[in-house]
Image (cartoon, rainbow, N blue to C red):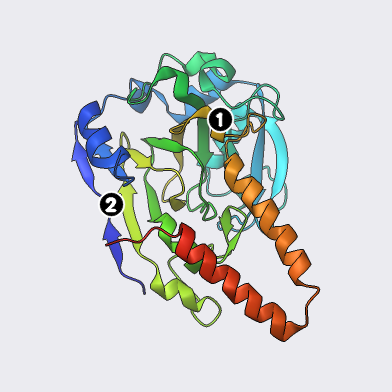
Amino acid sequence: MIDSVPVDVRYNISEKEFQEEFELKRKPCVFKGMDIGPCMRKWSVNYLCEKGGSKMATVHVSDTPQMNFITKNFLYRQLPFSDVVQRASELTHSEYFSAPDEYYYFRSLGEDVRKDPSNIMEQFPEFKEDIKWPHYFPEDKFFSSVFRIASAGMQLWTHYDVMDNFLIQVNGRKKAVLFPPSDALNLYLKGDKSEVTDVDSINLDKYPNFANVTKYQCMLEPGDILYIPALWFHNVVAVEFGVAVNVFWKNLDKKYYDQKDPYGNKDLLPAARSMDILNRALKVLSELPDTYKDFYARKMVSKIESSAFVKND
């Protein structure tokens, strides 16, 4: 077992306190006592099914609770929104795709999934009066709002986002585990995702560096808001059937973001260009015999470490 550090909890935090204590310091926090609107009392299964109705929705379906985007151990299926909510709320299903105890995970999409970010105020106008969130960022920085619905027990893969976001837990409890950006070398990354899916039961023989992580953890109750700074890795488990909304915003200048990215998960443009240059450099380096390739690769790593790593005093 790896010990965890509790995420800071603040009650009725003001915009100024949020910015000074957490946004500027790039630290996660759980906000309690915030007004998120009547959704907490209104968003029952019956209400969501009735209001969402027959609108078609794309949902992830998996035989296992640990959905893994690297191996893609799930199916994409389309169902009426009311069916998505109903099935996600059940432990066993009379109608199913592959198994009566399969798991469901819904993430809302934009009108044009290839171009438009999700905005629940536009895609789900029937719910827009029900929910509110703290507007602790400039309106022109807003990027997306994402509806999330998950079966009890469903665990989302460990990943990072390039934008700051609020995870607003409307109903059901959710466990969130986070790792700081400085742990990137310990998380066995493939792109923006970690190979380590089950962060509570680690095979340290396979992932020995994971023993060096700093693991933050919190349990989100209905009405809680988790602030996740950009680049913080997170892994969430729906302890119960749950409904949540993520709100993402561009905390940096818009010039750094890929304007053709509707999901907001592509690396910042300078980072993407740097990775492209690195991949080309490694291809050139591969022309050398192994001993020489190893030597110059270590020089490159040393150069990167001395020039780009942030030294924490």
Front residue of 291/246: it is 291
Place of residue 96 in the rendered image (x, y in percent of width and height, measured from the top left): 69, 45
Q: Secondary structure at mark 2?
A: loop
Answer few, some or many: residues within 10 Å of disc 1's Cα (few below 14, many 20 plus, some between 14 and 19).
few
Residue on which disc 1 sits: 255
**Residue at the (23%, 36%) spot, across then down:** 20
User: Which of the two marks, 2 or 1, is nearer to us in this view?
Assistant: 1
Q: Relative to residue 59, is residue 169 drawn left or right? A: left
Q: Relative to residue 234, is residue 68 drawn left or right? A: right
Front residue of 259/304: it is 304
Q: Is residue 223 above or below residue 131?
A: below
Q: Amino acid at mark 2?
A: Val
Place of residue 256 in the rendered image (x, y in percent of width and height, measured from the top left): 55, 35
Q: Find the distance from the CA under tag 2 to the CA under tag 1.
A: 31 Å
Sequence-wise first label, 2 or 1: 2
- Identify the image quadrant of residue 63: bottom right
Mark carried by residue 7: 2
- The reply to whether residue 198 is visible in this rendering is no
Front residue of 115/68: it is 115
| Number of marks drawn | 2
- Identify the image quadrant of residue 50: top right
**Residue at the (63%, 46%) spot, across then down:** 272
Q: Amino acid at mark 1?
A: Lys
Quarter the N terminus occupies: bottom left
Residue farthest to the right? 287
